[in-house]
Amino acid sequence: MAVDHVVPITSDFVSGLHCWHNLQLLTKSENSSKLNRFWPDMPDTKDPDLIRMVEEFKNGREHI
């Protein structure tokens, strides 16, 4: 078994917390296959508006 962050700690789209409510037990293979790509209520990460907003945030610009 492995301890997994439900919402990833680091991702281009989210930043999860390191707390009990964000942890779960998974098999090692489930945890390895999940990586930082899947979480509950995950938005459509191929949405061009979302991608633009993330890129603007990374570049220090506010999205209005």
Image (cartoon, rainbow, N blue to C red):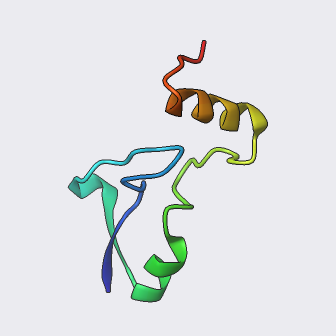
36 displayed left or right of 4: right
Q: Residue at x 22, y 57 (%)?
A: 20
Q: Quadrant of the rendered structure where residue 33 is?
A: bottom right
Q: Quadrant of the rendered structure where residue 6 is?
A: bottom left
43 displayed left or right of 34: right
Q: Residue at x 53, y 44 (%)?
A: 13
Residue 16 at x, y percent in the picture: 36, 48
- How many badges with numbers are in the image? 0
Q: Name the quadrant of the C terminus.
A: top right
Q: In the image as oriented, which residue stretches furthest toward the top?
A: 64
Q: Nearer the viewer, residue 59 or 23?
A: 59
Q: Nearer the viewer, residue 57 or 5?
A: 57
Q: Residue at x 73, y 31 (%)?
A: 49
53, above or below 20, in the image: above
Q: Name the quadrant of the N terminus.
A: bottom left
Residue 42 at x, y percent in the picture: 59, 49
Residue 61 at x, y percent in the picture: 54, 19
